[in-house]
Amino acid sequence: MDAGFSLSILVLMIMNIDPQTVLDTLLSRCKEHYSPCGQGNLIWREWGEKKVEKRPLILLHGGSGAWNHWTRTIPALENDFQIYLVDLPGCGDSADPPKPYDAESLVEIISLGLDTILPNGEPFDLISFSFGGVLSGLLAHSQARRIRSLTLVGSPILGLTGTGPANDLVEVPQGIPLREAVPLYKHNLQNLMLFKPEAIDDLALTIHINNMSKARLRSRGIARTSVLADSLNELPCALTCIFGAEDTTLNPNLEGVREYVHSLHPNTEFHVIPESGHWVQFESSEKVNDILLKNFNRVQS
């Protein structure tokens, strides 16, 4: 991948160029892959080039999201790694999963997808945000023979909280004018996703509005369960955690999550990014990208 391309993406972001241009420019350089999902396909997008000395990175997005949850991560990783981003079942451009669905059935679809896009038993590392992380412990067990590490970003390990700002969301009625919808979307982004008001820029709004227009998967019920906490027992790979210090989704709290993780995996790297909310890889992209690059540029074996 041309290093100049990644730099051009960063320049577009810094200059606050039209957000859709930023997203379209990223998409113009990816390769699409497909795997079965219900009556259609999961959509996988690939950036970067295969490197013999480095394992592919698989990235999973959050609930009601899509590949674009990683918009500020892709330019940092694509020069050094082959990265695959999937739209989860019922999200983005992927097909709906068969109903009824639960964590186990969703993971089965994703695991089959991994076997499809990496068909030769190739080892990989997994980076998962929010609801993607909720599914990732189960996914690690299903791919135990070849997963080498799991990095959880803003994932509610002890279950999505049922109280507080993350639950104070407003419904955006279908068909209302965009000028009326924008304040509602900003309210939801502030309460759930981002800590600093200035982080809710045009790019964040464009990503959020695009994703909400496509989201069909009902993920909150699954996210409130203990599925991730339970699946971290006997995890077959190394674990790293990254959280925003002001993440409103955590139950019971950040220290409780840290204590639980270290009770199971004492050597887990547990990074807390100050003045950042749930969507920490967007709000504090430089700090998160530095952690990811440091971790994955180590000698892989």
Image (cartoon, helix red, strand yellow):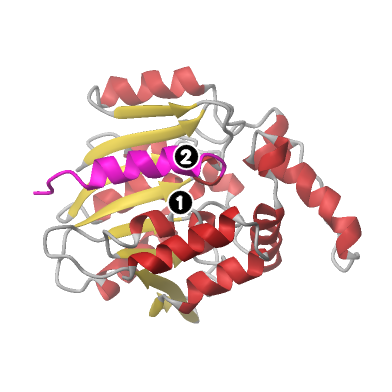
Q: Residue at x 63, y 42 (%)?
A: 193
The image shows residue 66 at horizontal and vertical percentages of 54, 62
The answer to the question of whether label 2 and label 1 lie on touching residues, with beta carbons closer than 8 A, is: yes
Residue at point 36%, 49% (across, down): 127
Q: In which quadrant of the rendered view does residue 53 lie?
A: bottom left
First to last magenta residue range = 283-301
- Relative to 143, 291 lies left or right: right
Q: Which mark is residue 155?
A: 2
Q: Is residue 171 visible?
A: no
Main SS of residues in magenta: helix
Quarter location, residue 228: top left
Mark drawn on residue 228: none
Q: Which residue is mark 1?
A: 132
Residue type for callout 1? Gly
Q: Residue at x 53, y 73 (%)?
A: 25
Placement of 275 over or under 232, stated as above or below: above
Of callouts 2 and 1, the N-terminal one: 1
Q: Position of residue 30 (x, y in %)?
A: 41, 75
Q: Nearer the viewer, residue 31 or 138?
A: 31
Q: Is residue 219 above or below residue 161?
A: below
* Depth order, front residue of 279/225: 279
Spatial separation of the CA atoms under disc 2 and disc 1: 8 Å
Amino acid type, callout 2 = Ser
- Up the image or down, 36 lies above or below 85; here it is below
Q: Is residue 300 magenta?
A: yes
Q: Give x and y (percent) for residue 248.
A: 62, 31
Can residue 124 be seen?
A: yes
Magenta stretch: includes residue 140: no
**Of helix, strand and loop, which one carries label 1?**
helix
> Crowding near pointer 1: few (<14 within 10 Å), some, many (20+)?
many
Closest to the observer: 19 or 242?
19
Please give left or right for residue 194 compared with residue 50 in the image.
right
